[in-house]
Amino acid sequence: MAVDLLLGLQWGDEGKGKIVDVLTKNYNIIARFQGGPNAGHTLEFDGIKHVLRTIPSGIFHKESINVIGNGVVIDPVVFVSELEGLNKFDIDYKKKLIISRKAHLILPTHRLLDAASEASKGKAKIGSTLKGIGPTYMDKTGRNGLRVGDLELEDFKERYRALADKHEEMISFYKVDIQYDLEELEAEFFAAVKALKELTFIDSEEFLNKSLKENKTILAEGAQGSLLDIDFGTYPFVTSSNTTAAGACTGLGVAPNKIGEVFGIFKAYTTRVGSGPFPTELFDEVGEKMAKIGNEFGAVTGRPRRCGWLDLIALKYAVQVNGVTQLMMMKSDVLSGFETLKVCTAYKYKGETIDHLPYNIEEENVTPIYTELKGWNADLTKMTSADQLPKELTDYIEFLEKELEVPIKIVSVGPDRTQTIHR
């Protein structure tokens, strides 16, 4: 058996939660492998909208086991709030949800550090979600962090105090006015830790590899998107973890030769939250229309998303870096009603035409070159099979498949799990 991966191929917000939910019935185990509570995986079914931050998107299926892997960073306060949100749906999460002992903990002072660091940057802000994720990963690589397994140690509070005191010294270094009541934040944190300890902690790499030997099916769920990868994204406007396929190996403890299918999720257009380069961004009424129809606001932060035409150069790059075997196109319904669609098929880069993603795609270096395709004007949301799709959409899909050299197997025509067309 192999581990299949599901990844976002743009700057996040591609609709991964919905597809995990759609695919979960095919898997025994859903495992999250990186990122923190800045993820907002939205699932919609039975007329109810659910937003998950840390918990894998398979939690609503009774048969699946959900694993939070070692590559994830966990904020106990946010996590317990998520658990409380599941109570009304009669989900036995104590049985269905297990956590790697090697996953790192986000402390209250990590969030404060995040806020102080971002405030000190002024106009050079990177657009942090201020969830404490960057500072937590910094402590992880700096070998200072606290992990879930440390909660089982008798001296956890002493370890916590030493690290929190160090953080407070660092906050004062930034010389910015950050108002906070640490005593109140810590009371909330330790109450959440107590609730967290009621769940099962595991050595997740052992559990997952044993499960493979037992012929269990596993789907690894990524957060954010490939263009936010700490190594391969639009640095420094990136997240703090490896969001690409390689991150699943290090974030779960499974070997590269155990990876099977790599499902790549992308929107039929492009969006981005926060700062950073975005070559195909639209600043006109077309971009506004996309944002309005697509309800482009962050699931966790509520921040408006920047919108633009599909960038095939960036998408090809993500397909290549991840070794994508199947593509899934989201929000095709949002593009209904646009007379002409544009797809970026090359860049004008420092005076020459290129068809790959260069080191720097800042506005002064890159101008997108577009190919135009005919749009469609049909309500896709009630369609249930590929043969019902308008010819122009089929032409759009086939054009992308030819350029990307990977089949588009799923086309999403609405937010609900039922609004999913398999090709």
Image (tube, grey):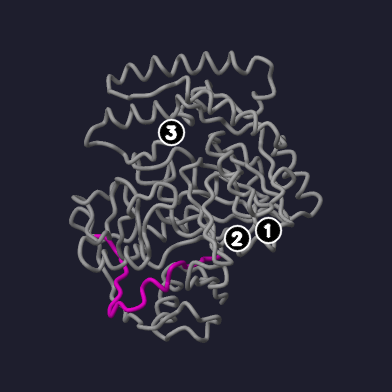
Secondary structure found at label 3: helix
Q: Position of residue 399 (x, y in %)?
A: 40, 76
> Which is more toward the observer, 368 or 156?
156
Secondary structure found at label 2: helix
- Looking at the image, do the residues carrying marks 3 and 1 touch, with CB atoms under 8 Å apart? no
Q: Quadrant of the C terminus?
A: bottom right
Secondary structure found at label 1: loop
Badge 1 crowding class, 10 Å Cα cut-off, few under 14, some 14 to 19, many 20 or more, is: some
What type is the residue that disc 2 sits on? Asp
- Residue under the point 53% across and 38% down: 78
> Which is more toward the observer, 382 or 320?
382
Magenta stretch: includes residue 271: no
- Residue under the point 65% across and 40% down: 253
Residue farthest along the front direction in this orientation: 88
From the viewer's perspective, is 400 left or right of 120? right
Badge 3 crowding class, 10 Å Cα cut-off, few under 14, some 14 to 19, many 20 or more, is: many
Point out the frontmost of discs 2 and 3. 2
The residue carrying mark 3 is 134
From the viewer's perspective, is 419 left or right of 59? left
N-term-proximal mark, 2 vs 3: 2
Label 1 to label 2, Cα distance in Å?
8 Å
The residue carrying mark 1 is 61
What type is the residue that disc 3 sits on? Gly
Highlighted range, magenta:
326-347
- Residue under the point 65% across and 60% down: 24
Label 3 to label 1, Cα distance in Å?
31 Å
The residue carrying mark 2 is 21
Q: Position of residue 120 (x, y in %)?
A: 27, 27
